[in-house]
Image (spheres, rainbow, N blue to C red):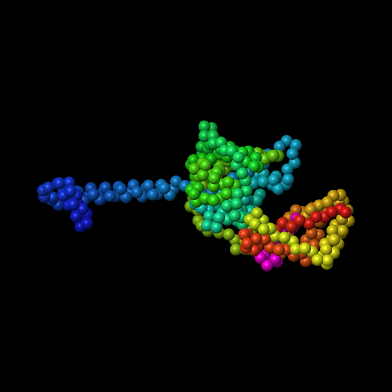
Amino acid sequence: MNLKIRRRIYANCWTNRTYGAINRDSMDAIENKFIHRNFILGLLCFISTLFSYSQYFSGEITYITSIIPDKGVELDSNILNADGRVSKYIITKGNYKNVYLDSNGQESYSYTYHNGSKRMYDYYISREYITYRDSRRGNSTNYSTRVIRDSIVYIVGFPCYQVQRETNYGLVTTFYSDSIQVDYDSFKEHAVGNWYEEIKQVGGSIKIKSIIKFPNYISITEAIQIKERKVYKEEFKLPEIPTVASVQSLDSQAQLLPLNKLQIECYNKSIKKAAKIKGRTKDYIVYLRFVLTESGETKFIEIYNSDKFGLGEIAMDIMESCDLTFIPGKIGNVIVASEVYFPIEFKMN
């Protein structure tokens, strides 16, 4: 018999005023009872600990989005392109990633949240760089919230209640299930989309379905598959390409330096050339998108909004031929590399 256990048994017998001789059989019986009791207590502690870890959801949710225009309304192609779009949402404690798929089922865009940096990273497969946002900078406002638990609907097999929120961009109805919850404190300070406050209101539940009523259309995003699984930290790793600040994250925006005489002549020459293009009847603004480094170098220049008159190509030529120079943007007092959207206006006169 284990000496430590035997001593504790003797001590218990003395404390409980149990006198008399204890033979080997009775000692073994007491010992077995003692070991059995400790085993049960240890098992209960293990189960309790395991439950505390497994109560939070970790895995992926697949969603599909539908766009329903208001009657007689023609929507922008960027909005219509979201109709039928499938996305995969991967989440675990403190991190998540939302991956949008194209019509061929291939990744086209994703945004990833890292709790350590409090940043959200936007990555388009077609671009050669990643932009980041500060998740602590809110971009929307909730005016009112109404939780409706007495109207249950089942979505992909889970009982869901709804929450209605009046926001600055429309009425949002979101369906949640108490069965799909995350540790909301691991997303503290996540103010983009009011996300932390919203999931905190519902005990950490995450969206199963949402209906957003915009001014000209309705957007419906609904889960079509929920898969609980272990999520690995490697799934949130970013591609090894340049990472720069987004326009929204800057405190001081990048600025064009005043043009000298030669730059003005070069610019005007291109604008006059564009005015002679046949078929043009109105002014037009072309936006160029590029990365501006900390040293003021422009990289990855591309046309943001295309047109049928070839004005985008003329705008590109202005950037390259007229030697435009820019002052980099800042976060706080620190100069940073950032994404820039630069407008070039083509007037008829």
Quadrant of the snapshot with the N terminus: bottom left
Give the residue displayed 26% in from the left and 48% down from the top: 36
Quadrant of the snapshot with the C terminus: bottom right
Give the residue displayed 44% in from the left and 48% down from the top: 54
Give the residue displayed 22% in from the left and 54% down from the top: 5
> Magenta stretch: residue 292 in it?
yes
The image shows residue 229 at horizontal and vertical percentages of 49, 50
Q: Is residue 256 visible to the viewer in this orientation of the structure?
A: yes
> In the image, which residues are magenta?
287-297
| Residue 214 position (above or below residue 297) | above
The image shows residue 133 at horizontal and vertical percentages of 61, 55
Q: Observer-nearest residue: 313 or 28?
A: 313
Count of picture labels = 0
Question: Is 215 situated left or right of 180 in this image?
Answer: right
Query: Of all residues shown, which one is farthest toward the top?
Result: 150
Q: Is residue 212 visible to the viewer in this orientation of the structure?
A: no
The image shows residue 115 at horizontal and vertical percentages of 53, 55
Question: Is 50 situated left or right of 21 in this image?
Answer: right
Question: Is 194 situated left or right of 24 in this image?
Answer: right
| Residue 165 position (above or below residue 118) | above
Query: Of all residues shown, which one is farthest toward the front?
Result: 333
> Magenta stretch: residue 157 in it?
no
Task: Locate residue 316: give its quadrant.
Answer: bottom right
Q: Observer-nearest residue: 61 or 255?
A: 255
The image shows residue 193 at horizontal and vertical percentages of 60, 47
Give the residue displayed 65% in from the left and 40% down from the top: 170
